[in-house]
Amino acid sequence: MSRLYSDVILDRFKHPRYFGELDVPDAAHEDVNPLCGDRIRVELRLDPAGGVEAMRYRGDACAISLASADLLAEMVEGRPAREALGLDRQVLLTALGTDIRPTRLRCVSLPLEVLRGALAGRTASRS
């Protein structure tokens, strides 16, 4: 059985590469997992063709959610929005390098859902 927090999760949680905010984001979205209270905000800078030029995230969330957000930012920067939207939870699960219990899968998918909200052009927050 694998550990809950893989080396990837621990590294991305302790040493995030994309945590922060953009000066003037073109799109932003925030959401919360009501089951555990994880809250993630994603901000995007889009290129003229609508591709993801930069992504930053911030939030008050568990190590799995924050590591997923960090990996997701790395995966989407420089990609067309269509490709970014095509990423799914399985890609993140593979990148995290460990088996995630079913009760924690929402921790992995929350950043992906927030990214989709930002790409849909909405700036919103949910309480």
Image (cartoon, rainbow, N blue to C red):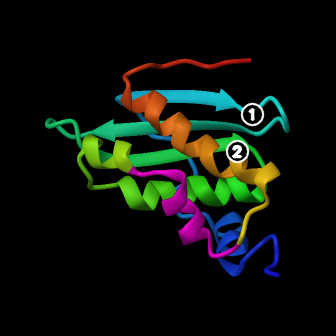
Pointer 1: residues within 10 angstroms few (<14), some, or many (20+)?
Answer: some
Camera sees residue 42: no
Q: Residue at 73% x, 76% y: name it.
A: 6
Furthest toward the left, the residue is 49
Which secondary structure, mark 1?
loop
Q: Secondary structure at mark 2?
A: helix
> Quadrant location of residue 33?
top right
The residue tagged 2 is: 106
Q: Which residues are magenta?
A: 87-98
Pointer 1 with pointer 2, Cβ within 8 A:
yes
Camera-side residue of 35 and 39: 35
Amino acid bearing label 1: Asn
Residue 91 in the magenta stretch? The answer is yes
Identify which residue is drawn at 35% across, 47% down. Answer: 86
As drawn, 39 above or below 107:
above
Q: Is residue 70 magenta?
A: no
Q: Earlier in the sequence, mark 1 or mark 2?
A: 1
- Is 104 on the left or on the right of 125, as rendered? right
Q: Position of residue 123 (x, y in %)?
A: 48, 19
Please, is residue 57 above or below residue 11 in the view? above
x, y percent for residue 45: 33, 39
Q: Quadrant of residue 25?
A: top left
The label on residue 33 is 1
Q: Relative to the observer, which residue lies in front, 23 or 85?
A: 85
Q: Check disc 2 and give the amino acid type.
A: Arg
Question: For the stretch drawn in magenta, what is the main secondary structure?
Answer: helix
Which quadrant would residue 27 be assigned to in this image?
Answer: top left
Quadrant in which the N terminus appears: bottom right
Work out whether 73 lies above or below 43.
below
